[in-house]
Amino acid sequence: MFGHCKTIKNNAYPLPSPVRQAGFTARTDIVSGVHGTWAPDKSYATRIPDCILGVVNMKLRFFAFVRKSSAFFNVWLVLAVLILGIVLARQGFELFAPASGDRAAGNGAIGDAGLEKGDVISGPVRVSDGDSLRLGRERVRLMGMDAPELDQTCKNPDGSPWPCGRVARQRLVQLAEGGPLQCTFEKRDRYGRALAICLAGGIDIGSILVLEGLAVSYDDYPEEEARARARKRGLWSGQFITPRNWRRGQR
């Protein structure tokens, strides 16, 4: 097809014999430089070489395909953005939104709006770090103690580091799995978390963490901390920065 167009471009397109007999030539009598259009004989005035029509049709089909492809792509792009927005919105709601007041957690747990001092919170457990967890959709902070931050490290007696934050979290996971976990609500902290004393199988897990030297006391467990110090257990076996100072940037 394109070779034939080159022939036309060189003004060598073969004109029909009636046109040649009328005295026209392909080199000199092509109207407006449009090869293959002849005048003034109206019977040939609208004749255009097939190769030019073919090229035009190819271009039109190409642009139509591009338009259809773009529309198809735009539809999928919009759907992908909507799905991503829904996923992020749900995750953000679970992380930051307070639990709904009309929700009832399992085993008699009370929703956010109805929590009062002494109420029991329970539900599926997910441990966050050494002193905080989730019960259902309620964020709970163990009251009266402070465990190392998850990324915090402490030092052994020989000065080598050990991941005290991760060890404390793992110990809380073990304690939470030791029996039905129930937390007694005391109050809210400034982050909206429920401050609570939690029992697993009837045992105060905050007390155990302080006693094993994996948390420090906030006046609620002074005897447990004294025993951990005396026995050089956990944090007290070497050197460590208090979790509060670690959060303030001291390293």
Image (cartoon, helix red, strand yellow):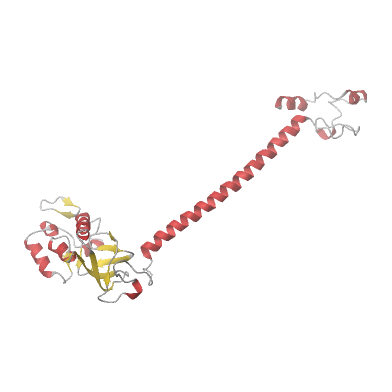
Q: Position of residue 137 (x, y in %)?
A: 34, 64
Q: Nearer the viewer, residue 49 or 123?
A: 123
Q: Residue at x 40, y 63 (%)?
A: 93
The answer to whether residue 196 is above or below residue 60 is: below
Give how far across and how far down residue 132 sits, in percent: 26, 63
* Residue 178 shown left or right of residue 1 in the figure: left
Relative depth, front residue between 87 and 190? 87
Please report the residue visible at 34 percent of the width from the left and 69 percent of the height from the top.
104
Residue 236 seen in render? yes
Q: In which quadrant is the N terminus drawn?
A: top right
Dividing the picture into quarters, in which one does residue 87 lie? bottom left
Corner quadrant of residue 205 = bottom left
Furthest-left residue in this view: 230
Residue at 15% x, 63% y is 208
Q: Quadrant of the C terminus?
A: bottom left
Q: Position of residue 149 (x, y in %)?
A: 24, 59
Count of residue discs: 0
| Left or right of 129 in this view: 51 | right
User: Can the viewer see residue 251?
Assistant: no
Please identify the quarter of the rendering in which residue 41 is found.
Answer: top right
Q: Of 157 and 71, which appears nearest the observer?
A: 71
Rendered residue at 48%/54% (across/down): 83
Q: Position of residue 230 (x, y in %)?
A: 6, 62
